[in-house]
Amino acid sequence: MTGHHRGRRVRAGLAAATAGVILTSCGIGEGFEGEPELSDGDVTISFNWWGADARTQMTLEAIELFEEEYPNIDVEPQYADWTGYWDRLATMTAAGEMPDVSQFDQLYLAAYAERGALLDLGRVSEFLDTSALGDELLDSGRVRGDLYAVPTGGTANGILINTSLFAEYGVELPDVETWTWDDLTRVAVELTEASDGEVHGISPFGSDSFSLTVWARQHGGQLFNDEGELVLDPEILASYWEQELAFIDSGASPSVAQLSETQGLPLDQGDLVTGKTAMGFIPAGQFNAYQAAAPDFDLRLADWPTNPDTEEGYQYLKPSMYWATSSTTQHPAESALLIDFLVNDPRVGEIFGLDRGEPGNPEFREIIEPTLDESSRRALAFTNQITQEVGPTPPITPAGASDIETLLTRYNQRVQFGDASPREAAEDLINELNDSIRAAS
């Protein structure tokens, strides 16, 4: 298990435990009573996000514009990288010091919302206009019917294709508009053989809940229901890993030993960037990062293969991230104004570009499109195409299930090394995840 995934498990536990502490010690819901109102005097609100330095500089620029628009509101920035973000947020929340506005991830949204740590944004709708966002995307910010977070945007799951490698080894790609899973496997094997094993055709999935969700939807299932229950059919999870093993056994993908060596590597050191594999499953929002890390390769995105029995509407827009407000904020109206500014002011769209995913606000997409480089335009065009075909937004990860990717990694390794059959591992993972969800309820 990588350090990254161990950290995720710790953060998930902290988030859940923290919320429990809040309920008993910090007076959740005591942030304000009655109707929220804007203050006549000077107000300071805190704003918390994760990301690299480039994101921080963009966000600081947006804050400056907001403060110019609302001179009596001072925004106190707080930021960290992903690794430390959730630990710190859990600690601050437990101490009753949760920032007024925070950047959130789908994995942790329900855990915080269900324990009363987040503000129901319906209470501040006078100051927060979400009408520009589509209902499917906006629904991803709802927990048990109430809106607790506003998505910054959404991204689809696609297959990254290194067309340079296919050209180099003389392997012709099938029509990716109509390809099947057999087509994908065949062409991946062809490339492996054409390169004498120097390059493998595809990096398989296995530990990613995003791709697992798309796989489940292709097969008529889903991970969770609206009541926060795990409803994943073990046969669907087993078939997901069986497809991975089929890639490995056929030579379409690297061997188990090779995959183990690259587990947890940063993006710029992974096989897709170094040219050791020619295709892989990625969130479309990461396409630009892959192309920037591999400037000598010509990359493109394609939709998943399908079979005749594939369910329609299997694709969906996964929220890139969210904006949420603490339930203990003393300034709910001002906090809502900040979120409104971030999701509606065109200048913010220009500043952020695709940094926080393909924007949920269509006006933002129109504004930034002429300024994008070729790889960014490809990513945006792919998401726009998929948007026409998406099905209903799946329920978000419930409290207690935030470490699903940690479990997927652990059980996937057992499957890869033959320590458990796909069906055995699927049943064990589902049992363990169910225990965790019940413990959090």
Image: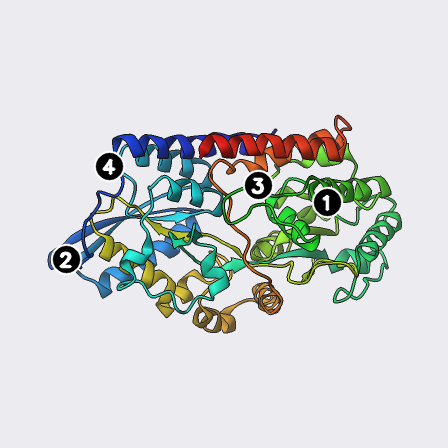
Among numbered discs 4 and 1, the one appearing first in the sequence: 4
Image coords of residue 396 (percent x, y): 50, 48
Question: Which residue corresponds to the image point at 52% horizontal and 37% vertical from the top-left?
Answer: 401
Image coords of residue 84 (percent x, y): 42, 35
Q: Relative to 166, does residue 27 appear above or below in the rendering? A: above
Closer mark to the observer between disc 2 and disc 3: 3
Among numbered discs 1 and 2, the one appearing first in the sequence: 2
Among numbered discs 4 and 2, the one appearing first in the sequence: 4
Closer mark to the observer between disc 1 and disc 3: 3
Measure the C-alpha gap from mark 4 to mark 3: 30 Å
Among numbered discs 4 and 3, the one appearing first in the sequence: 4
The residue that mark 3 highlights is 230
Residue neighbourhood size for the residue with mark 2, other residues' Cα within 10 Å, grouped as few (<14), some (14–19), many (≥20): few
Quarter of image, res 93: top left
Q: Please state, as top left, top right, bottom left or bottom right, where the C terminus lies in the image.
A: top left
Residue neighbourhood size for the residue with mark 3, other residues' Cα within 10 Å, grouped as few (<14), some (14–19), many (≥20): some
Q: Amino acid at mark 4?
A: Gly
Image coords of residue 372 (percent x, y): 52, 68
Question: Which residue corresponds to the image point at 74% horizontal and 67% vertical from the top-left?
Answer: 177
Q: Secondary structure at mark 1?
A: loop
Quarter of image, res 184: bottom right
Q: Between residues 360 and 310, which one lies in front from this camera angle?
A: 310
Q: Amino acid at mark 3?
A: Leu
The residue that mark 1 highlights is 204
Q: Amino acid at mark 2?
A: Ser
Q: Secondary structure at mark 2?
A: loop
Q: Which mark is residue 39?
A: 2
Q: Which mark is residue 27?
A: 4
Closer mark to the observer between disc 4 and disc 1: 4
Q: Are marks 4 and 1 in contact (CB under 8 Å)?
A: no
Q: Between residues 296 and 61, which one lies in front from this camera angle?
A: 61
